[in-house]
Image: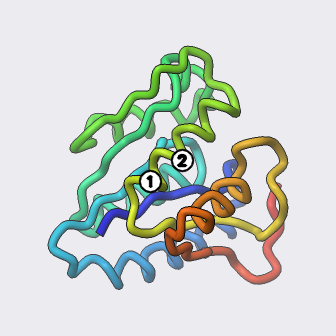
Amino acid sequence: MRIAISGHRGLADDVVSFVGAGIRTELSRYATERDLVGLSCLADGADQLFATLVLDAGGRLEVVVPAAEYRDGLPVDARPTYDALFAKADKIHTLEYVESTSAAHMAASELMVRMADRLFAVWDGQPARAFGGTADVVAYAQRQEVPVTVVWPPGAKRQ
């Protein structure tokens, strides 16, 4: 079972707790699969949380790097976790973009969806704030007929 992640960044602590529990519950449905593989760009927020929980569940991690400058565009405090998870990746997929733009991020998300059996979306159900946001990735997955599991606490607000 290959599961991709798309989700919001900059989650409040109470939302992180709920989302973590939700992802754990959803992953437990697939942890008995012979090969559980998580696909992630390792952005701060939902991506890093998902990748950590996939590894905790005994799964393997494949990282998709949207652009050569991607890591440098992450918040400074997210880089150590990015580096630690990147080092544990079973496989790395690198796109040919140099700049870490919305177009590069969407291209990376589209690649993950095409490689996935399912998409987990840490999504508040609102439209994307910019091109390549979670709503755009969910819409792409639906067009590709990849099942989507939304993990979001009722009543929670995005920062």
User: On the rendered image, what quadrant is the C terminus found in?
Assistant: bottom right
Secondary structure, mark 2, is helix
Q: What residue type is labelled 2?
A: Glu
Q: Which of 153 and 38 is in front in this view?
A: 38
x%, y% of residue 11?
Answer: 69, 56
Q: How far apart are marks 1 and 2 (CA)?
A: 6 Å
For image coordinates 54% across by 47% down, the residue present is 110
x%, y% of residue 121?
Answer: 59, 65
User: On the rendered image, what quadrant is the N terminus found in?
Assistant: bottom left
Secondary structure, mark 1, is helix
How packed mark 2 is, by other alpha carbons closer than 10 Å (few <14, some 14-19, many 20 or more), is many
How packed mark 1 is, by other alpha carbons closer than 10 Å (few <14, some 14-19, many 20 or more), is some
x%, y% of residue 151?
Answer: 60, 74
- Residue 25 falls in image quadrant: bottom left
Against 124, residue 71 (above or below) is above
Q: Which amino acid does label 1 sit on?
A: Arg
What coloring was used for the rendering? rainbow
Against 88, residue 137 (above or below) is below
Which mark, residue 110? 2
Against 106, residue 30 (above or below) is below
Disc 1 and disc 2 in contact, CB within 8 angstroms: yes
- Residue 33 falls in image quadrant: bottom left
For image coordinates 35% across by 35% down, the residue present is 93
> What residue is shown with label 1?
114
From the viewer's perspective, is 124 left or right of 36?
Answer: right
x%, y% of residue 59?
Answer: 24, 62
